[in-house]
Image (spheres, rainbow, N blue to C red):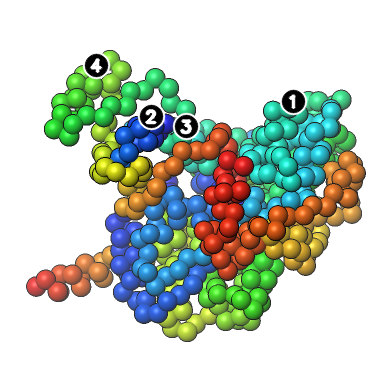
Amino acid sequence: MKYIDEYRDPEKVKSLIREIKSIVTKNWVIMEICGGQTHAFLHHGLDAMLPPQIELVHGPGCPICVTPLEQIDRAIAIASQPDVIFTSYGDMLRVPGSSKDLFSVRAKGGDVRVVYSPLEAVQIAEANPDKQAVFFAIGFETTAPANAMSVLQAKNKNVKNFSVLVSQVRVPPAMHAILSSKSNRVQGFLAAGHVCAVMGFHEYPPIAKKYRVPIVVTGFEPVDLLNGLLYAVKQLEAGQAVAENQYQRAVKFEGNESAQRTIRSVFESVDRKWRGIGIIPQSGWGLSPEFQMFDAEKRFDVQNIFTQESPLCIAGEILQGLKKPPQCTAFGKQCTQQM
Amino acid sequence: MCLAIPGKITEIYQRDTLRMAKIDFGGIAKEICLAYMPEAKVGDYTLIHVGFAISLMDEEEAQETLKLIKDIEGFENEINTDMSS
Amino acid sequence: MYSVWKTMHATNVTIEIDEQALPVKPAVKAACEMLGFDPLFVANEGKLVGFVKETDAGKVWGAMKRINYGGDAAIIGKVIGVGKSQVRMKTAIGGTRLVDMLPGEMLPRIC
């Protein structure tokens, strides 16, 4: 697979690890923002190959993990209604709300369907004119262009029985929130390469300068992750703090301007609640006035669902790199993968 | 947030006013939307996330990245040769 | 994967699988990459997983290769310890990771 296999070369991996080991002299705490990067570190066993001076903390860049409990409860409330076809990306089905998940709605007869692309959700709406088709529009900036296009298509084709439950979040405000916290430990970032493929990385130099942290736009293959770490460690060891791009084959400074135009048209900046963290101002996107008629929260009157997170849950501290999962008293007990 | 794969465009066509494409990824054919890549053409590699092309893969930059890493490998081999001689 | 895992639990051993030795068809690998699936957990009925003595492994593998459906037979790992139930994988890039059974249905990922 071109652009993948050559970035999984074990010899290059060994060289990069040796190079990092040869230059690191102090302990450094580095956060990889994206859940996909976290997955790659663990899937390839890379995390255990790093020198002990480097502590990797896993950031809040997983839209599944940061979707607030309220939004999941709203999704469940909508999906449980008769004559609703609720569509979603696959990984949301297993996330528990206050008392159940979308899987259990499906098990009880709810029409809950996994889609690969949001355009499929619009097609489902067109094919079922007597039902309401709702799409769970979650994601970071990487997914926003696709989510936005589903709404744009529905408008252009006058698909009135389509609506979206929006839970879009943005990376830079989350970085500000982490870095401005008094208990912040993060000294450098591997920025989310695919977010930057869409948005570019022009928002990062001011963050790097303000908080004096190196930020390296990084890809997702083992060679990319180690290359990004190498750049970050070089900066840290030299006392530098700039934004730079490791993932040059896929990311341009200005990003994808066509995608950004559609995002700006369909969405507008809103405050968003992050699971376990709370409201981060202007950290998300909601439907702009022109597209409000597609807002499932209003169409199904679920705006007044408010949910209390378990007092045991420290997901917010974990997602900010302040604590690790084994430090949670519920980890592996009340809170398991089977929930 | 970011599962995306580099697919090679094998065909481009229009559907429902949207520019669509067939891509080849490791022998699998998939239909994706090219609405955000107006400059993409058949033969290009594009990064695909949830059925949408979001970026063009830059072959020159890819080679440059690999070359820089090769230089690291080469430098290490030199050191190892010096140390063993 | 399920058979390996069940064997591990039944016999209290540590098993190490070699990712590079796993015979995954290229199209399956590509489909898994696209959807965020792990090929280890994709349904794969009609397969035989055999545990044999190290000294017999080559012979058994050779015999499997010679029969009709055995063309893709492969030695994919070994029992490396007794007394601790664990399945590990030596990854293709030279790392090691723990392999645990999936809790429930595998779902396509966006993240």
Q: Position of residue A306 (x, y in %)?
A: 83, 52
Quarter of the image with the N terminus of chain A is top left
As measured in the structure, the alpha-carbon distance from the residue carrying label 3 to the one carrying label 4 is: 25 Å
Instruction: Tell me, for residue C84, which label it has, or none.
Output: none
Letter of the chain that mark 3 sits on in the rendering: C
Q: Residues within 10 Å of mark 2 (few under 14, many from 20)?
A: few
Farthest residue in the top direction? Answer: C68
Instruction: Give the residue type at disc 4.
Output: Ile
Instruction: Give the residue type at disc 1.
Output: Gly
Q: Place residue A176 in its image quadrant.
A: bottom right
Vertical placement of residue A50 versus B5, above or below: below
As measured in the structure, the alpha-carbon distance from the residue carrying label 1 to the one carrying label 3 is: 26 Å
Q: Residues within 10 Å of mark 1 (few under 14, many from 20)?
A: few
Which numbered disc, 3 or 2, marks the residue closer to the eye? 2
Q: Place residue C16 in its image quadrant.
A: top left
Label 4 belongs to which residue? C67
Task: Kindly check if marks 2 and 4 are in contact, taking CB atoms under 8 A apart as contact.
Answer: no
Tell me what residue is drawn at x 21 percent, y 26 percent.
Answer: C61
Instruction: Give the residue type at disc 2.
Output: Ser
Mark 2 or mark 3, which is nearer the start of the sequence?
2
Residue A195 visible, this angle: no
Task: Judge from the rendering whether residue A1 lies leftward or rightward of residue A61; answer left or right.
Answer: left
Q: Residues within 10 Å of mark 4 (few under 14, many from 20)?
A: few
Vertical placement of residue A173 versus A153, above or below: below
As measured in the structure, the alpha-carbon distance from the residue carrying label 1 to the one carrying label 2 is: 32 Å
Q: Residues within 10 Å of mark 3 (few under 14, many from 20)?
A: few
Task: Judge from the rendering whether residue C71 lies leftward or rightward of residue A32; answer left or right.
Answer: left
Which numbered disc, 3 or 4, marks the residue closer to the eye? 3
Letter of the chain that mark 4 sits on in the rendering: C
Mark 1, secondary structure of its residue: loop
Instruction: Tell me, for residue A109, which label it has, or none.
Output: 1
